[in-house]
Amino acid sequence: MASHSSLEGKVAYVTGSTRGIGNAIARSFAAAGAAVVVNGRASRDAVEALAAELTERHGTACLAAFADQRDQDAVKRVFQDVFATYGRLDILVNNAGILDDGLLGMIAESSVDDSFAVNTLALIRNMQSAARLMRRTGSGSIINISSIIGTRGNPGEVVYGATKAAVVGMTLSAAKELAPAGIRVNAIAPGFIDTDLTRSLPPARFEERLASVGMGRIGTPQDVANVALFLASDASAYVTGQVIGVDGSMVI
Amino acid sequence: MSESQRLDAAIRRGLGLTNGDDLTTLAYGRTEYWDSVAHMQLVAAIENEFGIMMETDDVIAMSSYAAARQILQDHHGLALEP
């Protein structure tokens, strides 16, 4: 018998899943039995290799979706491919994001445009397409990855914080709008998580960030994936419109 | 069942209409039971019936029975009788 956290028979689309948090989420979902649509924009080979690996390892029919989240046509095609391949979508994880720090007065317009395109606008488009597929089955779970920066703010991250705060706003509104259709919408706000990005921080800044975490350790992508699995599964069947921090009591 | 009959049936299901309701006078926002929420149910019913995925612009433009027929004929190749 399938457990409450099983995703057997479900189709999940995880954006930005070739590395970091998205990769951990895609792996967790496939391990739980979902057919996972994996996505990345840097390397078609990497996306296809991940889909093949998950299919082989877990026996689920995973699909490679090579697409830049800024490309409206490419993003639209992903949903058409999902529909053509599976005929349904049960879970969307809007994870792909970019971080481009800059102090006020030194923020390039291109940085603003790119950040909002990937971190905010793409999420709205994805939710729009996902909701239409999910309405057909009268159920679904949408998980948007926000950030502690979007709920608490941080110097040098005005743009990033704005894009991630917008994720909270869209999550709360979408949750109210889609609840009658049986579709749940929640957000996760990770704190200091061990990714390529945090590993590239200067040692002094890394230590400073680490010292702000109450639990005294950096979070892992798996810490975030565990919460995503909960939100994707029937274990959270009555949870919607929530922003869940995964930050080990980080104070910024 | 012809594609026209299937479309009519999908519209009735999507909007919660009975067989006696006249479809030709339907208009989004002006017909009592065709509001924005019902519109998304209507789109889902049509997409499910024909196994298609409509463009967002078409979803927005589908504001009457005639418009629905036109869009489905022009963009999805449905053969609908006059």
Image (tube, coloured by chain):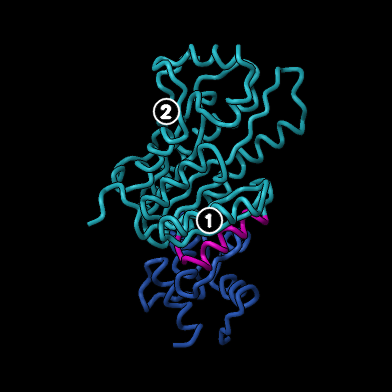
Chain colours: A cyan, B blue
Residue hosting label 1: A51
Mark 1 near mark 2, Cβ–Cβ under 8 Å? Answer: no
Q: What is the span of residues highlighted in magenta in the rendered image?
A: A73-88
Q: Quadrant of the N terminus of chain A?
A: bottom left
* A103 w.r.t. A227: above or below: above
Identify the residue at image location x=57%, y=57%.
Answer: A64
- Report in which chain the residue with disc 2 lies: A
- Residue drawn where x is 45% and y is 70% of the image: B48
How many marks on residues?
2
Q: Is residue B45 above or below residue A27?
A: below
Lateral position of residue B75 relative to residue B23, left or right: right
Q: Nearer the viewer, residue B25 or B48?
A: B48
Q: Secondary structure at mark 2?
A: strand
Please provide percent x and percent y for residue A157: 63, 22
Q: Is residue B32 visible?
A: no
Numbered circle sitting on residue A246: 2
Q: Position of residue B19 (x, y in %)?
A: 37, 78
Locate residue A9 relative to residue A109 in the image: left or right.
Answer: left
Task: Tell me the CA gap for discs 1 and 2.
Answer: 27 Å
Residue A83 in view here: yes
The image quadrant of residue B20 is: bottom left
Percent position of residue B70, x then y: 62, 74
Look at 49% across and 69% down and name the residue there. B47
**Any magenta on residue A51?**
no
CA neighbours of label 2 inside 10 A, class few (<14), some (14 to 19), many (20+): many
The kind of secondary structure element at disc 1 is: helix
Chain of residue at mark 1:
A
A136 to A108, vertically: above or below: below
- Magenta: predominant secondary structure element? helix
Amino acid type at circle 1 is: Ala
Give the amino acid type for the residue marked by disc 2 in the picture. Val
